[in-house]
Image (cartoon, rainbow, N blue to C red):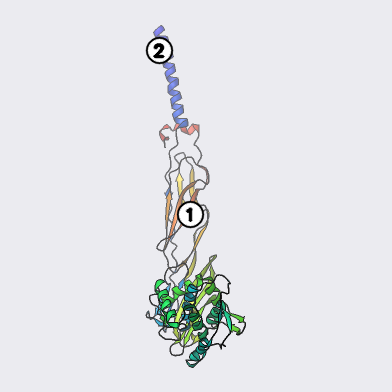
Amino acid sequence: MYRRRRATVFGGTGIILVTLVYLAMTLLAPVPAATAVIAKTAPLTGVAAAPVFPSYGASAIGAVGWDGVLGSAGSSAPQPMASITKIVTAFVVLQKKPLTGAEQGPTITLDARDVSYVQRYRSQLGKVIDMQVGERFSEREMLEIALIESANNYATSLAVWAYGSEEAYVAAAQKWTAAHGLTGTHIDDTCGMSSASQSTATDLVKLGKMALDDPVIAQITSTKKMTIDGVGEIDNTNKLLGHSGVDGLKTGTLYTYGANLLFSADWRIGGRTITVVGAVLGGGDGKIVNADVRALLASTKKGFHAVTLTDKGAGFASWSTVWGQRAQAVATKKATVVVWSSTPISAKVETQRIGVAAIGTQVGTVTYTIGSGTKVVVPLGLSKAIADPGPWWRLSNPGGLGG
């Protein structure tokens, strides 16, 4: 009897222990993690752009934030750039005599050598503004007269003041262009009256982007008109300022070659400011060039596309648990981008296996690759909670437990 009682006690205890172990294993065990099913993403590549370039000379257009140029046409050989040369003059003078903000800089007193430049350029049919011995202008005023009114004599006086002679200036300018990778640009004088001061349209796009980054040059070249003591009112030779978004940069005309324009323009596209920089070289006259630049700008603007990569809440993957719950991986924010032409856009969705999780838990990412490398990463959150299946399901599905 004793043995029977002992067997009964131990047997009952064993059953209790087994039951407790079973309950612990089923009620406390992790639930199985579910693997996401990733949805297909729609193609986002836009329509190819078709900029309308002039049929003469050379031309190119680019945009700040985009490498190189967006497109070009005509000759790739250097062309006479005329007074666009004065943008280089401004950079090289500012390299030697820097200005910041609206600072006027040192005072320059004109002498007989400066006055001699008036007759020199007038005899060459170049633009001049009269000078008098003893007149005094600040460095900034000299830059304004040279860049806004495009007075050749003031550009030369400024360069000689900074470097001592025209020859010393030209040597410094050639070093400057080489140092800045303007391999298609050659500087032969201070103001562009020499047809040997040449550049390519693509080099000028690069120069224009640099000019927009310089606060002094950018501010001066965007000024329509101003008054300077001793000179009076000066008007910008760039008659496109304020039209088609144009806010710079420099005209250039040689009667033996033609009319040129280095220009910049700003547009609001997709909530973002797009700045384009272009150059047109070798037009018949300023009116022809201006008309062709406006056509080029209009056609280029159509090539920029505001693309919605994803809306907030858009689904990219889904989970179904073995106990019957469902949830999605959704974008936690809206993402947009502005692209040029048919720039390819690809999307890569990455998710993780999930078990019990709260609503909004980050469960992955979608990474968009724009063109050759720009990336936009959007976090993915859980659309609704994945709750524990509860004791009844756990007790009746012991084989489905375990992560």
Task: Give the number of callouts.
Answer: 2
Quote the CA–CA distance across marks 2 and 1.
65 Å
Give the label on residue 378, or none.
Answer: 1
Residue 362 is situated, as x and y percent measured from the top left of the image, at 49, 47
The reply to whether the C-beta atoms of the residues labelled 2 and 1 are less than 8 Å apart is: no
Residue at the disc numbered 2? 7
Q: Work out which quarter of the rendered image holds the C terminus and state it.
A: top left
Residue 136 is situated, as x and y percent measured from the top left of the image, at 58, 82
State left or right for residue 180 relative to residue 226. left
Residue 33 is situated, as x and y percent measured from the top left of the image, at 43, 40
Residue 37 is situated, as x and y percent measured from the top left of the image, at 42, 48
Q: Nearer the viewer, mark 2 or mark 1?
A: 1
Q: Is 318 in front, or is 257?
A: 257
> Residue drawn 44% across and 55% down?
367
Q: Are there few (<14), some (14-19), or many (20+) residues within 10 Å of tag 2?
A: few
Visible in this render: residue 380?
yes
